[in-house]
Amino acid sequence: MKLRSSVPKITGNGPHREITAETTYARMVPHLKRIGVTRVADITGLDRVGIPVYNAISPRSFDIISVYNGKGATKIDAKTSAVMEAAERFAAALPMRPAAIASYPELEKSGRRVLDPRSCNFELHHAYRIDTPISWVEGYDLMNECGVLVPQFLAGYYMSYHEVPCYPVSTTNGIASGNSLEEAICHALCELVERDDWTMADLISNRLGKLAAEDGAGPVGAAIRAWAQERHPSLDPATLPPRAQFFMEKFLDAGIAIEVKNITSATGIPSFQAVVSEFVAESFSRSHHGIGTHPDAEVAVVRAISEVAQSRVVDIQAMREDITAAGQPVEKALYHVRRSNRANPDSWAIKPSARPVRFGDVPSHPSTDVMDDVRLLLQRLRARGLDRAIAVDLSAPGVPATVVRVIVPGIESWTVDRNKLGPRAAQAWNSALAAIHSAQRAPRSPAAAQ
């Protein structure tokens, strides 16, 4: 796998890409039938907010869902986003020819570079043993610039599989599409950082805060909860860039409350969680969220706000097969798309912060080149002890969309897949407990949050 040293961006009001959304969409239209898309639909009008949201519908999808979604500042951005999501899911489900069929110890003993399945934050499948022969495909370690074998089950995205998988579930985390290999890798790395940051914020500001309220009655528990919630504070809306303010005002003009939380972690890559809530009556309320991560803080915050608009419209449309009713039994990996009974105005994500932060105080790393973003993301991950980032090219032949899976062993994703908390999540939890050591009663372990 060879990456170019420089990939200049076309910047503007939309996402930072190598070519315009108009060009990307025009390239993809002749191939929609090939990737299974029968219709591209504008669903913006299902809600009263007005931020563009589109569907790309693939009735015979191999996926758990057949309706893919896209959002953006303009209609062309949104429908291009929807089509590219359909393209990445289509490519990720295609059959692959293994580069090897062997057990991990056999490959390691032979001297081949190989990813240990135990190094990722996934519980192992109950029928898998480390000496079980499985299928492997070739990936490329972006940090160490060398080829490495990874489990085929981890590289692709599968609803069914031809052998004992190493993990009980297959997820799309780290699968991304783009106009080029470099662009797809950048999008995949941003998604991995996003899920890592979201997990850390969920653990500390949400779950630790809740446990403090349950276990520490009185002023001590309240103080701990307030401290935990303020670890990931709201952004001061008056300090947002004009494009983000414009999007926020669309919600406010529609009578919908919105908070944007700064969930940026120690990597220093900007991450934000936007949450909107409506309290229509005492017996009916609802909330939705969107997450955005990008080296450029303005891109990240606009992405979070536009994604929360998408979340609302998609919920209203009620066509996504993975969204379930409140209280309905679902697999752990689908908890994050299960509806809640009602919105809690006192929850960390919805409640305004006592001390909001200025947008300009959040680190930002704007650039004019996709590869500058890729290098920064890899550098920041390595600085946090994550020393491998393995890319697998999943692109479908004949389709003008590059699709990759990027695997970063040790990165956290529990809030999305409920699979396994890793060492970095445990360290964050323990550091938070150490910071509130003066409390008379410490909250329970993170296992209680599961």
Image (cartoon, rainbow, N blue to C red):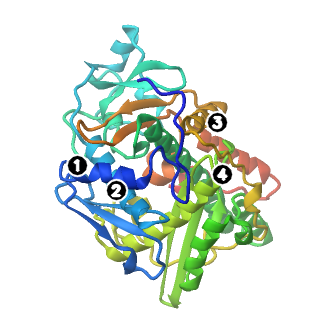
x then y, percent, for residue 437: 79, 51
How far apart are the two marked residues, 2 and 3, measured between alpha carbons? 33 Å
Amino acid type, label 3 = Arg
Amino acid type, label 4 = Thr
- Give the secondary structure at mark 4: loop
Q: Is residue 4 above or below residue 35?
A: above
Amino acid type, label 2 = Glu
N-term mark: 3 or 4: 4
Residue depicted at x 18% and y 53%: 33
- Give the secondary structure at mark 2: loop
Residue depicted at x 33% and y 13%: 106
Q: Alpha-carbon neighbours of circle 4 within 10 Å: few (<14), some, or many (≥20)?
A: many
Residue 114 visible in image: yes
Which numbered disc covers residue 264? 4
Tell me, yes or no, whether the two marked residues, 2 and 3, touch with CB atoms within 8 Å: no
Image quarter of the N terminus? top left
Residue depicted at x 35% and y 14%: 107
